[in-house]
Image: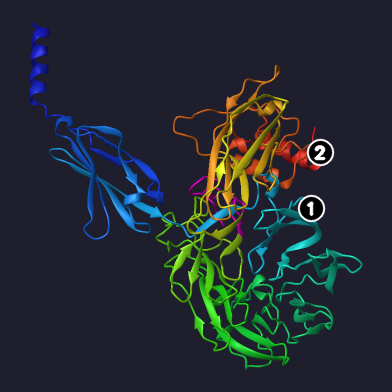
Amino acid sequence: MVAVCVLLLAALMQLGAPPSPPAPLITQIEFPPSGFKLRVGEQASVRVRVDGGAEDDLAWTLSLDGPGAEHVELASGAGRVAGVVATLSAESLVAGTRYILTLSANEERTVSVAHADVHVTEPVYALIPIEEGNRWQSVAGVYGSDASGDVLFIGGPNTDPFNIQIALVDRPSGQREPLLVPVWNTESVRLTPDGSRLFFFGWIPPAGSALGFLDLRTRMLGVVDPDEVGFHSTDASGRRVAYWGVSGTINGLQYFLYEEGSGRRQLTDYKDVVRTRVPAGGCPNQLGTRPLISADGSKVVIITQATLGLAPPDDTIGCRVFVYDVGEAQWRQAAALPRAVIVDIPALSADGRWLSFPAQARPPSTQPQAVLVDLETGELQDPVLEVGPYPTFDAAITGDGQGMIISTEADLDPRVGNADHNMELFHYDLATGEVRQISETTGGIVPTSGPCPSYRPGVSNDGGVVVFGFFVQSVELCQLDGPMRHERDGFIFRWVRAVRRRPGNRGPELDPIADQRVRAGETLALEFAARDPDGDPISFFAQVKGGDDVPPGSVMADHHDGTATLTWETRPEHAATTVVRVAAFDEGGDEVWQDVTLTVLASERSPAPSPIPSATPEPTASVTPTAPAPVCPGDCNGDGRVVINELLTATTIALGATPPTACPAAICASSDTVSIACLTRAVSAALTGCE
């Protein structure tokens, strides 16, 4: 009887209980929040998820909305769905136009909507790597271009801080030549606009430490001024050099002009004319004090806090811009900037008329902006380009005075898009106001108030070629959320040349590459070959897919004849399966790539190979690598020594900013990260040698 009562009571309670609420309605378009980005001619699958709610009453619609009243229904259905429901084709969309993708789901009492942006991109510039995917490219920060954009130079291996190598690159052919010049100061390296001389501060016999140059045609060294660091610039041929130094002066740092055949002359003699640290009121920082000389050598331009005795003191003025007429041997003040303005690295047009620089108004929270000065009229454009709340890191006027190269986090070019507000480079046409995005990356520098250094790009006369280096790790107050990756191919570039895409260019054709298997201890050699329908030179690049370089211990060599070789002298700790992405680039602005699986089989005394996950693994991948105790802890490339760049790599692995695959030798136990003990062993190896 008691049991029957309990059952009846339970039944009555169920009858009186309110119905359970339906599951929440979920509506998702599954791709990055920044939206779809399609190249002209490409297609993309649209994957959606609609879940929850009442199954019988659930209905959904996927539509695309464009400018004006344009509205297209792409797909619709009833009930839950998870998967690809439509395909977007760039052929039916207009490049540079923003479209809105809308997924709408409803059931009897609930409506849920998800949106996403869709862009069809048609970039004007293409990025072509200068390096080949080798670890030695963690180098000193120097890079530049001659006026034509055909001669480039980059830093070489930075193993000796007092003997930094420079690599000279012939852009049309891609041929690279290391220059064994004893550079001591990377900021002093400059290529003349005609590409004939490379200037630097270093060891030049018999003078010793001096500001000098290497004649690139005769390979002879010359001296401009002994014992001068020489922040400088040159005219087109390098026959006239403007620089600052202390030789023979009693008033501290002063400006000088060197003229071949005539020697040097001191241009200023005013106390504190060169200030290498930002004073309380603003004015230039150290790099902003570099004198600039016009291509014909007729004018020298400086930015200084001094009056040179040409104007009365004025507490409201922080920086003054002076122009020196070489023929007349006379200074004149061209412009004055408010005391609250801090000036960064300046640039001068070839004719000496236009001066540009990024300037930041105090307090430091104010974002720096691009400033342009007409040195004939003294007129200031501040800012040159409205970029909203985003800082401007570079403001380099092109040699022809028609455009400006700027770097900013703003989204200025609808043909490419910068929805993630990453720090990118842009070309700004001063006459038309048209902006064209040069770089095209994801990740990297997070939105910031502006503590990041500039790219300091080397620019050809018309801005058609730009040479610069990407940030690959956080520095000082400039923080990265990860290395900057190219949006299309996923590569991390360190050094690139940006070239204008050629209309109608046909991309290169890469020969298929077979997957490879070798036993640990054997040498793996992969041969690559490509050809270009337009006859353009081809550049190769390789990197572990989702990683930051070629596999540790391997070397990628571009032969600059349409072929390249990846050589890997494998060792027991390399036993794993690695996917390497190989790409061929042409000078017309296109690329083609292929992923190749490389399997290193374990030797009898080595553990079985395990897949190495990429830095951005697929959702289904969950493999943790195991690395045997290395012979030399921290030796990433297996050359028998540990250098500072390898210690930095181990540190970034420990902090979680770099995947363990970047340096398995930095992991000294069966783990997927670097411990304090691992770092200690790596530092010990760097100081005392490998075990």
Q: Quadrant of residue 84?
A: top left
Along the horizontal axis of the image, is 317 left or right of 569?
left
Q: Residues within 10 Å of mark 2 (few under 14, many from 20)?
A: few
Q: Magenta segment: does it hold 470?
A: yes
Which x, y percent locates residue 304? Answer: 65, 81
Task: Name the residue located 33 percent from the left edge and 53 percent from the top edge.
Answer: 93
Which x, y percent locates residue 325? Answer: 69, 89
Tag count? 2
Element class at badge 2:
loop
Q: Main secondary structure of the magenta part?
A: loop
Amino acid under disc 1 = Asp
Task: Name the residue located 60 percent from the left edge and 43 percent from the top edge.
Answer: 530
Amino acid under disc 2 = Gly
Q: Quadrant of residue 599?
A: top right
In the foreground, 541 or 521: 541
What number is the disc on residue 160? 1
Is tag 2's residue or tag 1's residue first in the polypeptide sequence?
1
In the foreground, 35 or 669: 35
Q: Is residue 468 above or below residue 242?
A: above
Residue furthest to the top in view is 1
Q: Write the start and end of the magenta stretch as one range.
A: 468-495
Which x, y percent locates residue 686? Answer: 77, 42
Q: Which residue is mark 2?
A: 689
